[in-house]
Amino acid sequence: MSEPAPSGDERRQNPEIRARFVEAYEVLEPFFDPAYAWAGHTHEHLAYRALHERFPQMSPQEVQILVEAARRVFSHRRAPAPG
């Protein structure tokens, strides 16, 4: 495991992906929403295709990174507040 970055230092190696995340999340959000699930399963497998179609210049690795990050953010936002 790598050490945390010192304050003020950017630990991400690809700032273009970070900059694209907000737009990518808007594309991906419906694929993780349980309201659109089919038989209790999300459509995560379709999220990869949708993102690649929206950003054809992205490599498969970049698509994977954004889908995984969006899944984590969506799970975190949907989790009930502790307390």
Image (cartoon, rainbow, N blue to C red):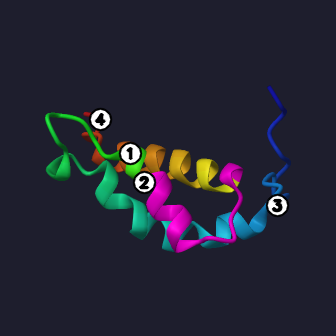
Q: Which residue is mark 2?
A: 47
Say whether residue 47 is left or right of residue 2. Answer: left
Say whether residue 50 is magenta: yes
In primary-sequence order, the first of circles 2 and 4 is: 2
The residue nearer to you, when weighing 39 against 19, is 39
Q: Nearer the viewer, residue 76 or 8?
A: 76
Seen at 35% across and 59% down, the residue is 29
Image position of 30 with respect to 71: above or below:
below
Determine which residue is flagged by label 1. Answer: 44
Between disc 1 and disc 4, the foreground one is 1
Question: On residue 8, which mark appears?
Answer: 3
* Residue type indicated by callout 4: Pro
Q: Secondary structure at mark 1?
A: helix
Give amino acid for label 3.
Answer: Gly
Can residue 79 be seen at all in this image of the molecule? Answer: yes
Mark 3–mark 4 CB contact (< 8 Å): no
Q: Which residue is mark 4?
A: 82
Mark 1 closeness class: few <14, some 14–19, many ≥20 residues within 10 Å: some
The x, y position of residue 14, in whole percent, is 79, 60
**Which image quarter holds the C terminus?**
top left
Q: Which residues are magenta?
A: 47-61
Residue count near mark 2 (Cα–Cα under 10 Å), binned few <14, some 14–19, many ≥20: many
How far apart, in angstroms, are the residues tagged by discs 1 and 4? 26 Å
- Callout in the foreground (2, 4): 2
Q: Reading the chain from its start, which is encountered first: label 2 or label 3?
A: 3
